[in-house]
């Protein structure tokens, strides 16, 4: 489960609803807000000004549409059920805002920052951060007679001033400053200067009545084009992670369990309604643009919560007595619960989008997608047209070898068709699809995707066809190598082992081994089905993730009095134990192929290779017998 949920639960436990360990929570909230500031600075490092300008249609188009439509719908519903227009508008604005902290942190952990759905979500969040400024200015004026237009114009002017100051400082002052700091070769000074820049830029915008996070984002964006970008991100990450943890703890502290018990029925009704509404709005904005439907739906799920700035707006409205206390508590509870569900929603957003939005409806139809190809013979069929499949196709094309590829990703097929590739939409597990590719007349069928179950189904379908077909399978490792061979695969290429062989060949060649001997060793290893490369020493990190079917290496030292001491090597029941002895070390010498009459002595170290349970059983036998 995502760690954010743990932070939220911690906040609930230390908050007033349970143990009340932190009665003075103002300092915690202050540090938590600093966490958001550091987070936005890190985000700014990933966004250069040209990149942000290229996304202006998303930021000001999708972002403004999401905020206006969401706030408008919620405000009208609240007005209909009895709230005044001022109260309804505040509630609509709060619901329209999403959590920058949770979404961006989760996107970073999922490595989806640069995906289409991630860019959409980040663009909306940036606009929401900008929209908070006029919202915070308007709320105090709702109960007073003031010139709204003049106040908003004044806020806009302050925003422009802050942007200009940070822009010029980030372009000319900060790079020179970090140049001097770098020459000093002091890690502490570099870290402290980074923190100083974040805090000062945040304080500048905060003093102008704007969001402190906005100033940090702008300074990060300016420094994102400098050569110190990666070092700045590395230096700021520990502070960001710790302070963000405190932020999520402070959010959990806001939840009142007594309110949850009293109004659980309302919350159970409103929570799914909130998620569906916010996800649907972003999805409907891009409903007519079929290639973006799935990404829009995913970004809608990413944004389906009430954010931290919504809490700021609610607190301000409560101070000016614009909302009743029970409404404020209900919205805070709804916000905390929706934040807690967000990491789970984001983790399952892709699967949910694929299930609800069929791939056939994703695209416009500028090019027809073929479901069969002209009659071909002595060609190559490529099942899976991802990176590996496309690389194979490029080399086949250079050698003028005909090929036909298939893939079940419609967008990839459409893009490949535009690029002139010979590819069709289909799933190779289906017999009709393989027949459409004339696999029975093909010289070779290549399975490039790393899915053991699906690859086995394609192999089975090929075997059922009339003519015997040569099948080459690419796998991640050698865990299923024997199964594929037994099922009829001509060749199985384990990616990790082949990568190791390529590295080994370079190392041997660069250390003076003749290339002819290097090639001979590589060919022998392939011929022996990578037997010498099977098994490796596992550490703590990999031991709990280790597949029970993967072979491992384990060194067993024979102490004085061990059962195997004094035995000949031929007396060891290796066949019954179903393990292999890769070598024996004695007095710093390694014996790779011991003779049958080799006698084991104490302090000998046997390197065993086999499946984990068999290795454990063999170790018990060597030490204790039985």
Image (spheres, helix red, strand yellow):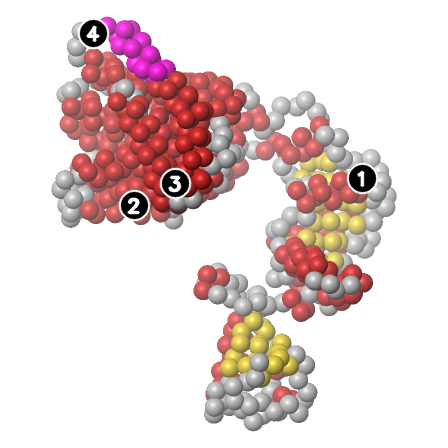
Disc 2 from disc 4: Cα separation: 42 Å
> Which marked residue is nearer to the observer: mark 3 or mark 1?
3
Disc 2 vs disc 4: Cβ atoms closer than 8 Å? no
Q: Which mark is residue 449?
A: none
Residue 1, magenta (yes or no): no
Image vertical order of residue 430 relative to residue 602, above or below: above
Disc 2 from disc 1: Cα separation: 54 Å
Q: Position of residue 330 (x, y in %)?
A: 22, 31
Q: Is residue 102 left or right of residue 378?
A: left
Disc 1 target residue: 397
Element under label 4? Answer: loop
Element under label 3? Answer: helix
The part of the chain drawn in magenta is: 147-161
Element under label 1? Answer: helix
Residue 154, magenta (yes or no): yes
Q: Which mark is residue 7?
A: 2
Disc 3 target residue: 190
Disc 3 from disc 4: Cα separation: 47 Å
Disc 3 from disc 2: Cα separation: 30 Å
Disc 4 target residue: 146
| Lower sequence index among marks 3 and 2 | 2
| Lower sequence index among marks 3 and 4 | 4
Mark 1: few/some/many CA within 10 Å (<14, 14-19, 20+) = few
Element under label 2? Answer: helix
Mark 3: few/some/many CA within 10 Å (<14, 14-19, 20+) = some
Image vertical order of residue 598 relative to residue 550, above or below: below
| Lower sequence index among marks 2 and 1 | 2
Q: Position of residue 491 (x, y in %)?
A: 74, 58
Mark 2: few/some/many CA within 10 Å (<14, 14-19, 20+) = many
> Which marked residue is nearer to the observer: mark 2 or mark 4?
4
């Amino acid at each position: 489960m995502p760690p954010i949920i743990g932070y939220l639960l911690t906040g609930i436990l230390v908050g007033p609803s349970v143990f009340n360990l932190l009665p003075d929570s103002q300092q915690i909230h202050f540090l938590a807000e600093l966490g958001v500031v550091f987070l936005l600075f890190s985000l700014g490092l990933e966004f250069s000004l040209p990149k942000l300008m290229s996304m202006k249609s998303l930021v000001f188009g999708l972002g403004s549409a999401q905020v206006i439509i969401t706030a408008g719908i919620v405000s009208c519903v609240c007005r209909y059920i009895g709230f005044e227009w001022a109260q309804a508008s505040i509630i609509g604005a709060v619901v329209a805002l999403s959590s920058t902290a949770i979404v961006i942190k989760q996107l970073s952990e999922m490595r989806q920052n640069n995906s289409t759905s991630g860019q959409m979500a980040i663009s909306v969040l940036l606009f929401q951060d900008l929209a908070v400024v006029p919202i915070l200015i308007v709320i105090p004026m709702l109960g007073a007679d003031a010139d709204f237009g003049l106040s908003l114009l004044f806020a806009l002017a302050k925003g422009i001033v802050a942007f200009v100051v940070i822009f010029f400082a980030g372009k000319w002052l900060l790079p020179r400053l970090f140049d001097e700091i770098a020459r000093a070769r002091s890690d502490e000074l570099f870290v402290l200067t980074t923190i100083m820049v974040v805090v000062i830029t945040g304080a500048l915008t905060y003093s102008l009545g704007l969001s402190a996070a906005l100033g940090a984002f702008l300074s990060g964006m300016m420094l994102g084009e400098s050569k110190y970008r990666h070092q700045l991100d590395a230096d700021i990450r520990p502070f960001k992670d710790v302070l963000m943890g405190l932020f999520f703890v402070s959010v959990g502290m806001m939840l009142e369990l007594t309110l949850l018990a009293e109004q659980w029925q309302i919350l159970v009704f409103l929570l799914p309604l909130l998620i569906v509404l916010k996800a649907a709005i972003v999805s409907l904005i891009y409903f007519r643009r079929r290639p973006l439907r799935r990404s829009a739906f995913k970004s809608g799920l990413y944004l389906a919560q009430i954010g931290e700035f919504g809490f700021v707006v609610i607190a301000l409205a409560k101070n000016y007595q614009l909302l009743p206390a029970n409404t404020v508590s209900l919205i805070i509870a709804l916000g905390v619960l929706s934040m807690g569900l967000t990491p789970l929603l984001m983790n399952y957003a892709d699967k949910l989008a694929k299930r609800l939005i069929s791939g056939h409806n994703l695209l416009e139809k500028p090019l027809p997608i073929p479901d069969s190809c002209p009659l071909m013979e002595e060609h190559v069929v490529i099942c899976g047209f991802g990176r590996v499949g496309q690389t194979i196709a490029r080399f086949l094309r250079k050698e003028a070898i005909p090929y036909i590829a298939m893939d079940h990703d419609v967008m990839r097929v459409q893009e490949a068709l535009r690029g002139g590739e010979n590819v069709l939409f289909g799933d190779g597990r289906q017999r009709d699809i393989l027949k459409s590719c004339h696999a029975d007349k093909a010289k070779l069928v290549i399975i490039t995707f790393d899915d053991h179950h699906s690859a086995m189904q394609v192999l089975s379908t090929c075997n059922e066809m009339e003519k015997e077909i040569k099948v080459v399978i690419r796998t991640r490792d050698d865990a299923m190598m024997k199964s594929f061979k037994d099922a009829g695969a001509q060749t199985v290429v384990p990616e990790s082992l082949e990568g190791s062989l390529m590295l080994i060949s370079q190392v041997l060649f660069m250390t003076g081994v003749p290339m002819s001997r290097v090639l001979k060793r590589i060919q022998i290893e392939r011929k022996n089905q990578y037997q010498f490369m099977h098994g490796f020493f596992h550490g703590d990190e990999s031991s709990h993730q280790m597949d029970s079917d993967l072979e491992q290496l384990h060194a067993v030292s024979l102490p004085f009095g061990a059962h195997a001491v004094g035995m000949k090597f031929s007396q060891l029941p290796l066949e019954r134990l179903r393990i292999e002895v890769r070598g024996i070390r004695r007095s710093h010498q390694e014996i790779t192929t011991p003779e049958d009459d080799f006698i084991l002595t104490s302090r000998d170290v046997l390197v065993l290779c086999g499946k984990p349970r068999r290795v454990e059983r063999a170790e018990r036998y060597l030490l204790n017998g039985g």
